[in-house]
Amino acid sequence: VTPGGEIVVYCHWGMRGLDAAFLLQQLGFKSVRSLVGGIDRWAQEIDTDILRY
């Protein structure tokens, strides 16, 4: 991971991913994104083959 590269973080529901994205930005990483709704929302709306837990 380099400060100039794009980073996408995610967690189960999105809140911890958002915290991680904020921390990475504070550490100087410029292109950081958080997956809104986490992997759970992704599994419901984008890739329904992913098992939900």
Image (cartoon, rainbow, N blue to C red):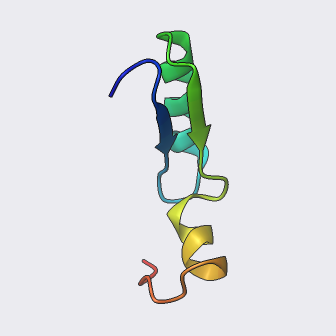
Quarter that holds the N terminus: top left
Residue beneath the point at 65% across and 59% down = 37
Horizontal placement of 53 versus 39: left or right?
left
Quadrant assignment, res 47: bottom right
Horizontal placement of 18 versus 11: left or right?
right
Q: Is residue 51 above or below residue 23?
A: below
Quarter that holds the C terminus: bottom left
- Give the number of callouts: 0
Q: Is residue 3 above or below residue 40?
A: above
* Place of residue 24 in the rendered image (x, y in percent of width and height, measured from the top left): 48, 21
> Foreground: 12 or 45?
45
* Place of residue 12 in the rendered image (x, y in percent of width and height, measured from the top left): 48, 59
Q: Residue furthest front?
A: 4
> Foreground: 31 or 40?
31
Residue beneath the point at 67% across and 79% down = 45
Horizontal placement of 35 versus 23: left or right?
right
Q: Residue furthest bottom?
A: 49
Residue beneath the point at 49% across and 50% down = 10
> Foreground: 16 or 39?
39
Q: Is residue 37 above or below residue 3?
A: below
Horizontal placement of 52 versus 40: left or right?
left
Q: Residue furthest left?
A: 1
Residue beneath the point at 36% across and 22% down = 2
Q: Is residue 47 above or below residue 25?
A: below
Quadrant assignment, res 40: bottom right
* Place of residue 39 in the rendered image (x, y in percent of width and height, measured from the top left): 51, 64
